[in-house]
Image (cartoon, grey):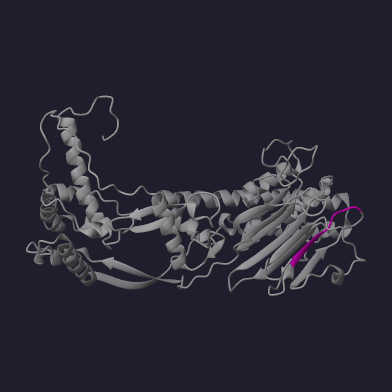
Amino acid sequence: MAPGTFSLVGLIETWLTDEITDAEIAIPGFSVLRSDRRSQEGGVALYYSTQLKLTVINDPPFQSRETLWCMRPLDATGLCTVAVIYRPPNNSPEADTLLLSALNQFLARGHTHVLLMGDFNCPQLHTRDHSSGSFQTELLALCDLLPPNNHVLQPTRFRSNDTLSILDLLLTNEELMIEDVHYLPPLDASGHVCLQCEFVCYASRVADDSIFTRRHVNFSVLRNLLLVNILWNYAVADSDTAWRDFAFFFQTLISIATITTNLPVASIRQFRLRNRTRKWICGRNSAWLAYANARSPDTWEAFTSLRNHCVTLIRMDKQEYQKCLARRFTANPKYLYKHINSMRRVEPGITTLTISADTVTTPTQAADVLRAQFVSVLTPASNHTPLIPPIHFGPSLTDIEFTRPNVINKLLHLKVNTSTGKDGFHPRVLKGCANELSFPLSMPSSHLFSNSTIPAAWKSGLVIPIHKTGSRADPSNYRSVTLLSNISKVMESIIADAITNHLESNSLLHPNQHGFR
């Protein structure tokens, strides 16, 4: 294992004892943390790059010989926590309860980046086919309460006479924190595969998230400016030049009518436990310390009773918090996406791309690779126009009227929550000035339609790559979404309505035809 190749290496069932020193298992470029076995138990270890600084978590209940818990600060607000866990297949119910309690407290700490890896010996976890009260049932209940994301979807244990099973898990508190999970051959005589992945534990933010620039258009001022200015130059025969002049003057008027203010970002209320629940949790922690010191049945029963009551209270608090969020989502759907983005710790953008064994990391190179991928899957336009013999079925559609009422109707029906196209004209601005824009848009549309031409800018758009499935490093796993000019969509919609009305009014569509309606 060469230095610089990996940052974290977790080992399960190390079989190390206190007689084996760190020097005997040292790897150049790595430091090691270990939790050795007792008697026939497996033990765990974690190798980490010397460039990292990890701190072991030793406070109860993170003291089991089969687990290793550590953390690393990322910045002023971020904290990465890593755990290596081994659960023996013959684990006692008491040990399972302690492990579940440790997992519960570990996930409930609310750290920004959480990575749990290890052998949980739960072959039926994915099928949910297990008895009530088993460790797998309790682990699933914990996943429902504090949902971690499992990234291991293929069998990890192979034996000649046994059924393939998933025993090893990689759990994170966010889906995008793990990329490119590889299932490598087992080491030596082991029956478990080696799991290799990319752990994205930090996403830098350049802008100050506490302040954002709010741009508000004064529609009264903008409407008055539109009434006294002619935006479209009909003396110019070239549609591209006329569109550039229109876009320039319209953007200038929008800038004049825009009011810019800097406002603090509205804080999103995060989930917090009520004071009553916090008091019960303090009592539960005290009961755990009493059990850790006495190890008696009475202290264990007292701890489990308080633990179950705390779980009930936490679920009640979370349900009330979710009801409050649901009410806000219903009132404003955009708040849902705002809440989702506030919970993300890893930006869902493009990290690295791999093509022909080369890794692309810069934004310019990634854009070139994705552009080549999108071009390769598109069918090139043919210059050949097929000759179709004329068939007369009735009246022909020879002209389309771009009247002011039609333009106003289309502008008023624009969705203000959609994105801005490459021209920079937001649908909210177009809708707010529908009456004033009806004339400067209706006449040019008729002019363009009669000349069978459109500005080249209307054919240009912003291409956004959207990840579909599979590895995020594979360019073929992205699809393209294009944001076009909203003004061009108005003209297209009027033409589409005219064609549909012509087909239906002249009974050119069969009654069983469901398309084009």
Q: Residue at image x 50%, y 59%?
A: 348
Residue 468 x, y percent position in the rendering: 48, 49
Task: From the viewer's side, name the closer residue of 427 and 223.
Answer: 427
Q: Residue furthest top?
A: 511
Q: What is the total number of numbered labels drawn onto the structure image? A: 0
Residue 102 x, y percent position in the rendering: 74, 56
Residue 375, by quadrant, is bottom left
Q: Is residue 300 visible?
A: yes
Residue 137, by quadrant, is top right
Q: Which residues are magenta?
A: 40-47
Examine the rendered structure and indicate whether residue 120 appears above or below residue 37: above
Examine the rendered structure and indicate whether residue 511 appears above or below residue 460: above
Whether residue 168 sits left or right of residue 456 in the image: it is right
Task: From the viewer's side, name the closer residue of 313 and 82.
Answer: 82
Residue 342 x, y percent position in the rendering: 50, 61
Task: From the viewer's side, name the closer residue of 44 and 189.
Answer: 189
Residue 314 x, y percent position in the rendering: 63, 52
Looking at the rendered image, the quarter that the C terminus falls into is top left
Examine the rendered structure and indicate whether residue 97 appears above or below residue 161: below
Q: Does 293 appear in magenta?
A: no
Q: Residue furthest left?
A: 235
Whether residue 197 sits left or right of residue 359 in the image: it is right
Task: From the viewer's side, name the closer residue of 349 and 298.
Answer: 349
Looking at the rendered image, the quarter that the N terminus falls into is bottom right
Q: Is residue 110 visible?
A: no
Examine the rendered structure and indicate whether residue 257 appears above or below residue 517: below
